[in-house]
Amino acid sequence: MKNIIIDTDLGFDCDDAGALAIANYLHKKGMINILAVTHCVNKEIGAQAIQGINKFYGNGDIPIGYADSFCLNVDRVYEEFFLKLKYRQDFKGFKQKPSFYKFLNLIAENKKGNNVNAETVIIDKLFSSRDKSITFVGIGQLNNLATIIEKHSEISRQKIEKCVLMCGNFSQQGEYFDDGETLWNGEFNIIMDLKSSQQVFADKNLYIDVIDYFQGNDILTGEGLVGQFDNPVYKAYLAHGKGRECPSWDLIAVMYASGLYDDCFEVSEYGSINVGKYGKTTFKKGKGNHRLIKIKSEKKDAIRQEINYIFAKGNKNG
């Protein structure tokens, strides 16, 4: 059974909530062991939103923390990222989506905040775990992971078996920002904290498996949540998806990290990933500790059905 730490940027879209639903269900069934969940944005309300989901699934005792600092100004994230994409007119609708804070307040357990620092939570779990026994699952920006490997390199190298990260773009060519100059084929989790992304992938000791943005992009899920009005995850999907099924980016990362669905994935040989000046991600086979993970095309429908099956269970474990 995998021992997992999940680091999420819950609030920017509903897939983080979906990923936590999958993880909580598997944890409650005794199929994985969630050691902790941390929020990589420095707002207490994010930790409380995580708590709201965990408690719904009967896992309110899982330790939670949030980042001390973060370079991203979340109040302007949609304007700075989505609305500057020259060829993505459909993203104009993001102006009507709930704000980061309004969304988190929908699902937060309470509004008093959670004062536990993410670094403290993660280090506590590293020190109390066996060597090479932890899978670190990053489904947000990489600032918490960067902090750990910078300040606690020896213990992180000793205790973390591998990192599973949902990030990067290895499947498409870039687009241009409105200035017409900067080639962009970056991905949200990479470019929203570019310095941390570069730091993590420059580390020579971490073993990292990467599931890029396009792996879950066409696996639309959420049908299984319909009608669960007391479920904070359903509230997340209603707020962001407006009743439509949504891409399963972060959910795929959790499913792969669990080790329970290995037959659904293709794993590349080892190589190295580089994060460029503007967030471009490239993979070179050969020397390195990085791998790319892809969903087998014939397994996509099975994964979609499994996600909706787990969603439909809600907080019932039968």
Image (spheres, rainbow, N blue to C red):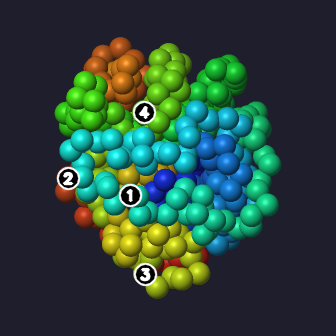
Closer to the eye: label 2 or 4: 4
In-front residue for pair 195/177 = 177
Which of the marked residues, 1 or 4, is nearer the chain's N terminus?
1
Pointers 2 and 3 in contact (C-beta within 8 Å)? no
Which of the marked residues, 2 or 3, is nearer the chain's N terminus?
3
Whether residue 216 can be seen here: yes
Which of the marked residues, 3 or 4, is nearer the chain's N terminus?
4
Mark identifier at residue 226: 3
Q: Quadrant of the C terminus?
A: bottom right
Residue count near mark 4 (Cα–Cα under 10 Å), binned few <14, some 14–19, many ≥20: many
Residue 309 drawn above or below residue 202: below
Which of the marked residues, 2 or 4, is nearer the chain's N terminus?
4
The residue lying at 62 percent from left, 35 percent from top is 70
Q: Which residue is mark 1?
A: 94
The residue lying at 25 percent from left, 64 percent from top is 301
Q: Which residue is mark 2?
A: 297
Q: Which three-letter amino acid code belongs to the residue tagged 1?
A: Phe
Question: Where does the image place residue 307, in percent across and percent down from the top left?
Answer: 40, 66
